[in-house]
Structures are given as structure tokens and as C-alpha cells.
Image: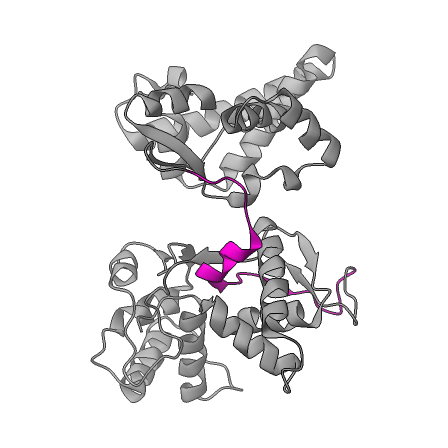
Amino acid sequence: MRYHTDRLATAQERTAKSRALLNFLATATARLGRTQPDLGLYSQWLGLEQEILADKPDFYLFHEHLERDNNPLYFHEFVERAAAHQLQYLGDANLSSMLPASLPQEIATGLMEMSRSAIDFEQYRDFIVNRTFRETLLCHTQINLRRDLQPASMRDFAFAAPVRLVTPDEASYNPTIPKLRSPSGSVIALRTPLSAAALTMLVDVFPRALPFDELLLRSRAKIDASHATDAAAHAQRLSDALLSCLIASMVTISTRTPPFASLPGERPIASKFAQLQVRRSTSVTNLLHNTIELDPIAAQLIQFMDGSRDDAALRDELMRLIDAGGMQASVEATPDQMLQDYLNRFVRMALLVG
């Protein structure tokens, strides 16, 4: 694509021609693959790239594939360059991607046997899973790292659960054992009353994060009002459960609570950054640094949430936006109910400032 568009002047021309070239290549190799079997795998790979980029915006294609200065490195080469600047590999943003427990036992064992260091392990793992994109974290070399994860470490963090409970209409549902499903589709069972109480609570309050001590206290009260079980035993069980959920990407951890609202408040205030973004797009970044796609009415309504308007003023703005857009309000919902629905959604999206 870079070769094909190198002489074009504008980013718009380059992205359009790149898409056209990729479509042509995918179609051509698929046809040739019918009579030339050695092109089959190449054709499949191009077809996959075509599917991936079909749903990506132009700016993604331009900056991911058409940058003129783009020099890939193996992971070990990146670490060596970092070391020259007194930096060392800490880990990856996605913790589960670097843990042996996320691989089948025989594969993890084979990797550990051939690896002389954590760097070796990561490099060989890249080879096995064809990993070509990393979100690597570095720290200064003078920091003494401890790479063994201990359940007790969970007690220093606050936890949020960007997941949902498996519902009765799903094949994996079990009425006696609650299960969580992550956005990626993976499922984990909550096999103890304490873990079920804690994780259900985190799902209910999301996007809020609860500190370990508060989560423990509230979970114990929910399952054992008499506190008959020793608190230290419950703390150990909850630590174990939260570490398992962290490894499975069912919870996120933080050392502080992000400044978003848990209730809309009398005069709702939206993230200033989101208010700036909706002037050009319906795609915004929330206070958890996630990308949120808003419907057109929501994108316009959020611009009025600067703390100067109460519910009555916001309701009037909402009705005006609906009328101006030629949209028909739900006959089953009053204007106040419609506004409350939007406000509750903004809370759940972590778009309102506390």
C-alpha cells in the first residue's frame, strides 16, 4: 500500500487508493488460489486484513499502515534499546497476555524450559501466537522487580468489573453457579459465595471501583451477617478470587478512584474532553480512557452539561434536539424519563465528572 500510494499528495487519496489496492489483491489472490494451492495461505491472510480494515476509520489505516517511518523490531531488540537508556521491561498493559497460566500447561512448560529470562519467555511467546503488536510498560533499571504475583498484593488496589453476568438465555448459564462474561467473550465461574457476592457487587456499581477493604466488608455483610467466618480467612479467599479474575481480564485494578460521578447530580457536568470531541465526532474518550460511541442526540446533549443547567433545563434542551432532528420521542416515556435514561447512561459510560 505504501508503494502504491507513495506519489499521492493527500492522506485522503492515499487511504482511498490503499483500500482499493487491498481489495484488488484479496480478490485476485483468492481467484488464483483455486488453481495455485501455494497461494492459498497468502490469500487467506489478505482476506483477513481486508476484513479488519473494512471496519477501521481512515485515520487508523493511514497511521497504522502508511507511515513513512515504520521500522518494526523484535521484542528482545526493543528491550535492548531500552536498556541503553537505563530502562527495563516491567510488563504489558494487558496483564493476562504475559502470564503462563493463560497458555495450555504443556505449551507454558515448554516455553519456560527454553527461556533463560522473562524476556526470552515473551519473545518465544510472540513467535508462537504470531504477536505483532505490543503495549509494553517500562520502568527505571534501578527498581528491583518482583515478578511473582501474590494474592496478598490485591489488598493494595481498588477493583472495577467491566463485565456482565451470564444470563439464563446463554448456553453457559448455571442457576447455582454465577458466571461472568468479559467483553471478549471469555467466561469464568464464581464458585464461592464470597466471590459471587464481591463480583456481583462490582458489576452492579460499574464503572465505579471499590477498594479491597470496602469490597471485603460489603461482601462479608452480604453473605454472612453474623461475621461468623474469620475476617482473615475471608480476606485470603477474596484475594485469591480477585487475582484469578485479574488474570482472566474480568477485573481492572487501580491505585486511585477515577474522578467520575456515581450519580448525575443536580447540575450534571460532563468531561471537558468529551465535550470538545463531540464537536467533531460522536466517538469520545471517557474518564477511564476508553472510547465510547454516542448516538447523535447524546453527542449533542452532552455539550450542554457544563454544570450551569439543572434537570429542567436539560430536559428542554433534549426535547429541542429531538424536534430539530426530526426524531419522534417514545410515546411510552415522558421527557423526564428520557432525560434520566440519558443521564444514567452517561454515568455508566464514565462520562460525568464527580
Figure colour scheme = one colour
Report whether 332 appears left or right of 338.
right
Magenta stretch holds residue 160: yes
Judge from the rendering whether residue 283 lies leftward or rightward of residue 332; answer left or right. left
**Horizontally, is 144 left or right of 333 in the view?**
left
User: From which residue to which does the magenta span run?
Assistant: 145-171
Residue 9: x percent and y percent? 26, 24
Rendered location of residue 159, percent (x, y): 49, 63
Query: Which residue is depicted at the point 63% across and 86% down?
Result: 225
Q: Is residue 36 visible?
A: no
| Above/below status of 110 relative to 225 | above
Q: What is the residue that sits farthest to the left in this orientation? A: 308
Q: Nearer the viewer, residue 169 or 129?
A: 129
Horizontal and vertical percent for residue 156?
Answer: 44, 60
Can you give x and y, in whole percent of width and height, for residue 352 in the image? 34, 70
Relative to 197, say whether 285 is above or below: above
Q: Is residue 162 above or below residue 17?
A: below
Query: In the depicted view, which residue is nearer to us: 55 or 237?
Result: 237
Q: Residue at x 48, y 71 (%)?
A: 213
* Nearer to the camera, 113 or 52: 113
Quadrant of the image containing the N terminus:
top left
Total marks in image: 0
Residue occupying the point 64% across, 26% down: 111
Q: Is residue 13 magenta?
A: no
Is residue 170 visible in the rendered structure shown here? yes
In front here: 40 or 201?
A: 201
Quarter of the picture containing the C terminus is bottom left
